[in-house]
Image (spheres, helix red, strand yellow):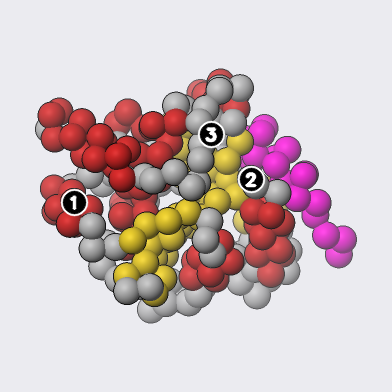
Amino acid sequence: MSELPPELLLQAYAVGVFPMAEGRDDPRLFFVDPDKRGILPLDGFHIPRSLRKTVRRRIFDVVWDRDFEAVLNGCAEATERRPDTWINPEIRRLYLALHARGHAHSVEVRRDGLLVGGLYGVRLGGAFFGESMFSRATDASKVALVHLVAKLKAGGFILLDTQFITDHLTRFGAVEIPRDDYRRMLNEAIAAPVQFDVAEDDWPSVEGLLQELTQTS
């Protein structure tokens, strides 16, 4: 089986489809174009009050792109609640290649120097496609999501794609929209001028997001 070029993967994202595998041990990939697409509206993001307190306490150190591969491995590892994942070797190869080209990014959550959670995804213009997250400490992946949303909002992003929605994501405001609406939003997002600097301190943006949510809740 020939290897898929990373550039083709970016082209797929640009037209609204994304890759998956049946399982970690299945070498094949297939592309998905669902009738309903999960998104997390950046202006409709919700943070539960208990999580706001955790974020404000800053018990975790949050950085970007320091160890993308470790985050990818964390998302692929088996847990009691998730005995199998769709991150097979080909998915791993492709996203490592996208990261090397500056298109895939990781949010890394650390405590006492140890990686305890995070998420990764793909960026095209003003669109961010969230791929997967993991947590080895209470609220670690949720804190990563807060930092992601804060950076995207501050940078002028338009779209945070979650692919599908889960009960977990709906608590943060995730919704489903029809495919045609998604594609219109995607086209606008890809063409949008945005700011995105992984070396920039997230905390001012996070504080601004928390303040905004406090005033509207």
Picture coordinates of residue 104, whole percent (x, y): 60, 50
- For marks 3 and 2, give the CA distance: 11 Å
Q: Earlier in the sequence, mark 3 or mark 2?
A: 2
Quarter that holds the C terminus: top left
- Under mark 3, the amino acid is Ala
- In which quarter of the view is residue 82 placed? bottom left
Q: Please tell me how crowded label 1 is: few (under 14), some (14-19), or many (20+) other residues with Cα within 10 Å.
A: few
Q: How many marks?
A: 3
Q: Earlier in the sequence, mark 3 or mark 1?
A: 1
Position above or below: 112 against 124 = below
Question: Is residue 172 rendered magenta in the image?
Answer: no
- For marks 1 and 2, give the CA distance: 30 Å
Camera-nearest label, 1 or 2: 1
Q: Provide the residue designation for mark 3.
A: 127
Left or right: where does residue 21 sit relative to residue 2? left
User: Which stretch is magenta?
Assistant: 1-19
- Under mark 2, the amino acid is His
